[in-house]
Structures are given as C-alpha cells and as structure tokens.
Image (cartoon, rainbow, N blue to C red):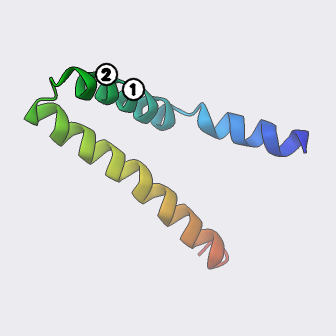
Amino acid sequence: MQEVLRSRLSRLLCVKSLVTLLLTVVFAVLALRGEVGQDFMTVYTVIVAFYFGTQVERTARKGDGGE
C-alpha cells in the first residue's frame, strides 16, 4: 500500500504534472475574477490536452504489452 502511494506521489511531482496543476489553479483564479484572456485560454487548452493525451497514450501502451 505504501509503495503504491509513493509511486503515485512521485508521478504527481513530475514537471508536466506540476505545470498542469499550476496552470489549472491560475485558470480557476482568473475565471473567478472574470479575467481569462483568449491567449491564456489557448495556451491552457494546449497544455492540458497534451498532458491528458500523454496519459491516454501511456495507458494504451500498458494495455498492449508496452509495444
């Protein structure tokens, strides 16, 4: 159990996860203030799509035996 928790924590602390989480917090703050600009929205969308796209690809590879 502790090994699983440690593994998940280490994956959470990788750079792309930190960037995605930080941008999500910034997006939430800007949205609550009503100050989300089009440029920020574009950058945020691209980064979040990349993050989740790589997660889906990694999951698919694990299902195919790593090929």
**Residue under the image location 48 percent in, 65 percent down:** 57
Asked which secondary structure carries label 1, the reply is: helix
Return the x and y of residue 6 as percentages of the image width and height: 79, 36
- Nearest the viewer among 24 and 14 is 24
Horizontal relation, residue 27 to residue 65: left or right? left
Amino acid type of the residue that numbered disc 2 sits on in the rendered structure = Val
| Residue at point 64%, 40% (across, down) | 11
Question: Of tags 1 and 2, which is closer to the observer?
Answer: 2
Q: In terms of image quadrants, where is residue 44?
A: top left
Label 2: element kind: helix
Amino acid type at mark 1: Val
Residue 50 position within the rendered picture, expressed as x and y whole percent measured from the top left = 35, 51
Look at the image and tell me in which quarter the N terminus lies. top right
Contact between labelled residues 2 and 1, with CB atoms less than 8 Å apart: yes
State the mark number for residue 53. Answer: none
Instruction: Give neighbour class at mark 1: few <14, some 14-19, many 20+ (Cα, 10 Å).
Output: few
Query: Circle 2 is placed at which residue position?
Result: 29
| Left or right of 64 on screen, residue 23 | left
Q: Which residue is located at x 41 percent, y 35 percent?
A: 20
Q: CA gap, disc 1 to disc 2?
A: 6 Å
Residue holding disc 1: 25
- Return the x and y of residue 10 as percentages of the image width and height: 68, 35
